[in-house]
Image (cartoon, rainbow, N blue to C red):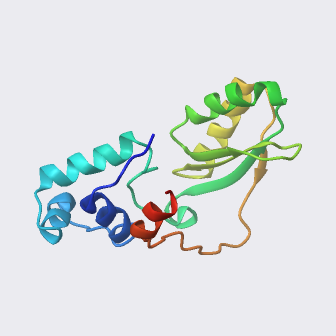
Amino acid sequence: MTFLLTQLQQDIINQYQKGFPLCSRPYKALAEQFNSTEDIVLREIQVLDENGFLSRIGAVFNHQKAGASTLAAIAVPESELDSVAEIVNQFEQVNHNYGREHRYNLWFVATANNDKALAEVLEEIEKLTNYPVLILPMEESYHIDLAFNINFAVAQQSRH
């Protein structure tokens, strides 16, 4: 199925992967920049979300300064990978997980308010999955800028 993005949808994606307005009505601020209305901007974001173009809208924090976090992994039989991933995804403290081709094939990042709360979450994941969690605390942080300016005109042409 082909989904053609409107100019407003393209502008939202390209201009707000970072630098999202920090104010009481950020969608109104976006609307003013795009000569639109807050309701239209919110509707377009909802369409983008419903069609899988957005993973989330939210702040990125340094979890080591704002609380506690760790990379973690579980070795899961391939036949159980999806069901165990669903269990892990139930925790609001898990901000993403993914499969890898390794004995430890399910990886995730867990965050919490403090070290004690993080340990409790990881223990609960072990209890519910029946698999031990390998805890891989961060030794050094690196900043990777994952914002991309997408040339939608070229992307549209290359599909034909």
Percent across and percent down for residue 132 are 81, 35
Q: Residue furthest right?
A: 103
Q: Is residue 52 left or right of residue 145?
A: left
Q: Is residue 60 visible?
A: no
Percent across and percent down for residue 42 are 21, 49
Q: Quadrant of residue 46?
A: top left
The answer to whether residue 65 is above or below residue 54 is: below
Q: Quadrant of residue 15?
A: bottom left
Q: Nearer the viewer, residue 95 or 100?
A: 100
Q: Is residue 19 left or right of residue 137?
A: left
Q: Nearer the viewer, residue 33 or 145?
A: 33
Percent across and percent down for residue 114 are 56, 52
Q: Is residue 84 left or right of residue 40?
A: right
Q: Is residue 96 left or right of residue 51?
A: right
Q: Is residue 124 visible?
A: yes
The answer to whether residue 149 is above or below residue 89 is: below
The answer to whether residue 39 is above or below residue 83 is: below
The answer to whether residue 101 is above or below residue 10 is: above
The number of discs equals: 0
Q: Residue furthest front?
A: 160
* Residue shown at 31% from the left, 44% from the top: 47
Q: Quadrant of residue 130?
A: top right
Percent across and percent down for residue 160 are 49, 57
Q: Quadrant of the N terminus?
A: top left
* Residue shown at 38% from the left, 54% from the top: 57
* Residue shown at 64% from the left, 45% from the top: 97
